[in-house]
Image (spheres, coloured by chain):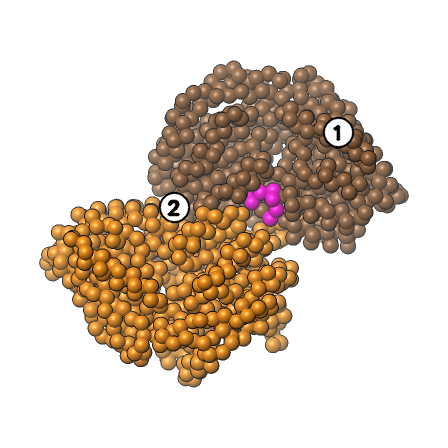
Chain colours: A orange, B brown
């Protein structure tokens, strides 16, 4: 590789400028294509990507990182239920930390522009492997091929570039130097000052199982851009996507003469988790966590003296107060719940509907009409295997199926709850052994909160009969203050109701989508435009992305000294 | 008051613009005059300010805030050693919190521009009372009149306006709305998005005793500007300055129709501290702490789930490797240590000098020559009562004198330590009873670290014989990593030494002043230009001021909905 850092900076300059423009205008933009369609990619790409994935199977993954004390890996495809057979180097935590520390001084002195350009290059190279990545995400997380391609590919890389753009802005905001002049008494004091950006320390990036890349890239790029090495700790059941990403980051660093140990992979097992060992180490100064509310809130309650960014989960709700076209609205809600079998942090679980129904453009509908429309909309997907495969994908892990089956039994035991739809599997057209489960749908009155007042990680939809739209908003926002939420949805034809509800959602820190239907998924979050997680409720403290996500990852150290007479004369 | 918020915003617009320009260019700027000289102030001002202060003495302070359950106050002037006799309303914590919470919804909806303008008005009104403030600070903290006027007046307000400027920048960075358009399949999706800034919660501002206003204004203004109410908890021995500030803030709020309970005062006693009760309350979401390393590090170790900004203290050092003019350099160091009897967070305590001396422009000097020059420079101040009064002021509290007397005894007991100067009092020309103490100076070798390897809060200077300049820098930076430091000082004529030292200071997170002497105090920190505290060592995690100081005080909540056909047509 003979490209210089200067050339790299120049090559990525327009992308960075466009990203900064996008986060400021919040307009639609991406340097990538998030569709696998052959219209957008060279003819050999899809096949080569699949082949590259298959080449990885059944052997040790080559990372060439230091401190390897063994090989780990027991990923099982939710589509084939077969082990992937890939093992990853198990790094000795102390050695990985030492290697990161050793890489830090030179990285600190690398110009922030160069660090940003290197991250953009990493994003581009990871995108170049996106067909391979799509198969990798599919077979560890269970996402459908198209979703793995888009949501875990470009959409995730976009969140990373978004964080880079914020990091660039925050660092640009600090003048590198200044001439300061003031008269004290009769003396003119002229000082030259230098302001140096100093990274905080190693950033640990803990990834979740179901969407391994989406929060990882912003955390990695935000830390790297601001001068911090990163250690990536993937979830033990979904290592491969981040192993590919780490491999590509290390290659980019090496290609440009930087220390590849600025990015390493720390794998572990469910039985012997390793995260806390890194977290407790004084050299680790930044922790980005995505995963379970249990461990996330443990970190939120215990971690002090370090920067902590979390995204966990919450209870996402829909309040369907009224709508013009019931079928269309039911379809939007059903699609949002069905997408990736409700294993997304934006999947709606609780659907509030006024118990007396409401009036649509074509006449009044009862609560039962609404419930039936939702069941029909889910059936429409579930009963067409090709569609189900594209939307629902597979269920990543058996416990999610167990949860839903337990809820089905519980609901059957409740006098007031009614199982409207059983969580049957669908038959995947390509993978007959795929772990699939279509949503359980339960209708129940609002006084049955024990069933729905927590997040159930699996395909389940509760249709809750609320006294009114206002009551529904009150309960939904109350649940969010207690349990958190990432995405909330409101459907109403009543502008006054929308206006007063909006305020309740806002103070509860709930991002709200209003009356969304049609071709865009209601739970699609667009990087550069949609803020993800408010930090105001228990679903996490980190927003993807804002200035607060980046501003503390570096600090400013200054020096000052009198300007020499020659310097002052030159300036005059 | 008939001025509208619109008019207020317009009236302060140029100040805000200039402040933003100043923090970006880091140039010298202030809307205030920091000298009490009659050249800058109306003739009646100084006398009226003194009279206003005297009017406050011996009676209850009028704050008209809710929840008063008693009166507290036992401040004693370090200059007269007489009680001020002022009592302050003791607020019931629950009531103060409720009042702040009640004020929050309207404040959240007040435009950020208006909130910023109101804070600028508060600063202007507090400045208008600056002669009264100067006497108040003198008689609680012990600062000299001129220092109280400047350092606790305009210099502190400048830090507040600096924080406001950052808050303005961080909030402006968030677009209030956006039109987002993307084609999904064959459908053009057009969404209108709203991004709402939501404050985090009540900000508790804990002030220190010796410099009550300096860190308080930035914390107050940063929280208020971003929509959070503040409760100010002054140190029990130095309440008056913040009572005046809170009174003025409340008046400004009331004058413009805002709830004065956005700013309240929470007083307590040394025997029954109340801070923790506020800190533990879930409505308190931001804590700004200035004070002892002991309580500060307790907060740093225990507080989770809330924003915490700390400034505590550390061991500030001078490395005098070499200089051209010994007398001039000694004078600069002596003045920095003498200023406010070393009760500043920027006061240098440890002066490292190569044990073999160095060469000046007029020839070689030995370690003893340097030590004697430092003693002579301190004597020059201490032996001239008018100068001593202006520079050293008084010692705020007896424990500081006890510490120094204990160190004197300890030093006498050490075989290798040598007391070069005893901590005698000087006679204050205006206040014969003033608690004064001139610096103890002890010379000792570097192996006597037990004496100087911690911060001693009182007038003491250790002159440490180092093996070399490099050894001195190594030890000084090592102490900082362990104990923290806020300001470090380096004197050298060797550019290569300066360059390699600078790197060591930078990675240790030490702000460094190089070769400063002359009319400006070496430990003068200029708002808008000098970053104060790096956050990289144990002296605190908060920088005055940077984006990280403000960016997390508010969060962003978004909503989105399809644009109506009419809206889309209008835009086209």
Q: Which residue is mark 1?
A: B408
Mark 2 packing: few (<14 Cα in 10 Å), some, or many (20+)?
many
Give the chain letter at badge 1.
Answer: B
In the rendered image of this protein, does residue A159 appear above or below residue A299? below
Whichever of labels 2 and 1 marks the residue nearer the N terminus, that label is 2
In the drawing, what numbered circle is on residue B439? Answer: none
Left of B74 or right of it: where is B113?
Answer: left
For image coordinates 45% across by 31% down, the residue present is B249
Mark count = 2
Provide residue A435's location: percent of width, then percent of height. 31, 72
Q: Quadrant of the N terminus of chain A?
A: bottom right
Tell me the element at label 2.
strand
A533 shown above or below A14: above
The percent position of residue A244, horizontal first and vertical second, equals 49, 72
Structural crowding at the residue carrying mark 1, measured as other residues with C-alpha within 10 Å and reported as few (<14), some (14–19) or many (≥20): many
Residue that label 2 marks: B198
Q: Work out whether residue A241 can be spotted.
A: no
Q: Is residue A12 above or below residue B510?
A: below
For residue A259, side relative to residue B110 (left or right): right
Q: Are marks 2 and 1 in contact (CB under 8 Å)?
A: no
Residue A369 on image: x %, y %: 13, 60
Location of residue A97 (image quadrant) = bottom right
The answer to whether one can see residue B459 in this image is: yes
Which element carries disc 1, helix, strand or loop?
helix
The one of A10 and B402 positioned closer to us in this rendering: B402
Span highlighted in magenta in the image: B536-542
Marks 2/1: CA distance? Answer: 54 Å
Instruction: Residue at 26%, 60% (x, y): give it.
Output: A406
What type of secondary structure mainly makes up the magenta span?
loop
Rendered location of residue A516, percent (x, y): 26, 60
């Amino acid at each position: 590789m003979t490209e210089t850092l200067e050339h790299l900076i120049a090559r990525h300059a327009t992308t960075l400028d466009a990203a900064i423009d996008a986060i400021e205008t919040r307009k639609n933009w991406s340097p990538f294509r998030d569709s696998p369609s052959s219209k957008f990619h060279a003819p050999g790409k899809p096949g080569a990507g699949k082949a590259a994935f298959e080449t990885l199977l059944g052997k040790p993954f080559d990372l060439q990182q230091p401190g390897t004390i063994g090989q780990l890996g027991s990923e099982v495809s939710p589509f084939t239920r077969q082990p992937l057979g890939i093992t990853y180097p198990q790094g000795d935590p102390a050695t990985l930390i030492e290697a990161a520390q050793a890489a830090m001084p030179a990285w600190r002195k690398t110009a922030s522009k160069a660090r940003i350009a290197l991250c953009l290059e990493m994003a581009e190279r990871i995108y170049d492997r996106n067909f391979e990545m799509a198969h990798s995400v599919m077979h560890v997380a269970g996402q459908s091929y198209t979703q793995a391609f888009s949501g875990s590919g470009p959409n995730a890389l976009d969140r990373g570039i978004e964080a880079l753009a914020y990091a660039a802005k925050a660092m640009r905001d600090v003048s590198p130097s200044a001439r300061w002049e003031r008269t004290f008494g009769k003396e003119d004091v002229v000082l030259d000052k230098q302001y140096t950006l100093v990274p905080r320390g190693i950033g640990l990036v803990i990834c979740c199982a179901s969407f391994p890349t989406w929060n990882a890239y912003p955390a990695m790029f935000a830390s790297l851009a601001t001068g911090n090495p990163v250690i990536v700790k993937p979830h033990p059941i979904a290592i491969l996507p981040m192993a590919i990403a780490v491999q590509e980051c290390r290659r980019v660093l090496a290609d440009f003469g930087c220390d590849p140990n600025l990015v390493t992979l720390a794998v572990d097992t469910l039985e012997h988790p390793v995260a806390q060992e890194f977290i407790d180490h004084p050299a680790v100064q930044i922790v980005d966590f995505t995963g379970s509310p249990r461990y996330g809130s443990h970190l939120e309650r215990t971690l002090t003296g370090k920067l902590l960014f979390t995204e966990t989960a919450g209870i996402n709700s829909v309040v369907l107060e009224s709508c013009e076209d019931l079928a269309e609205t039911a379809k939007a809600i059903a699609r949002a719940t069905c997408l990736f079998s409700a294993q997304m942090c934006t999947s709606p679980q609780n659907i509030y509907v006024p118990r007396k129904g409401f009036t649509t453009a074509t006449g009044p509908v009862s609560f039962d009409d609404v419930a039936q429309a939702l069941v029909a909309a889910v059936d429409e997907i579930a009963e067409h295997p090709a569609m189900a495969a594209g939307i629902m994908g597979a269920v990543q892990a058996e416990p999610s199926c167990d949860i839903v089956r337990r809820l089905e039994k519980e609901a059957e035991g409740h006098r007031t709850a009614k199982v409207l739809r059983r969580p049957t599997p669908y038959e995947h057209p390509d993978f007959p052994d795929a772990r699939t489960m279509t949503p359980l749908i339960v209708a129940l009155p609002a006084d049955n909160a024990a069933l729905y007042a927590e997040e159930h990680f699996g395909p389940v939809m509760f249709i809750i009969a609320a006294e009114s739209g206002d009551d529904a908003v009150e309960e939904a926002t109350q649940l969010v203050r207690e349990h958190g939420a990432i995405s909330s949805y409101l459907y109403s034809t009543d502008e006054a109701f929308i206006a007063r509800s909006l305020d309740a959602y806002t103070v509860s820190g709930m991002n709200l989508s209003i009356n969304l239907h049609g071709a865009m998924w209601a739970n699609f979050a667009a990087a550069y435009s949609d803020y993800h997680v408010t930090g105001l409720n228990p679903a996490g403290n980190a927003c993807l992305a804002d200035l607060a996500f980046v501003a503390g990852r570096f600090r400013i150290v200054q020096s000052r000294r009198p300007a020499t007479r020659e310097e002052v004369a030159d300036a005059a």
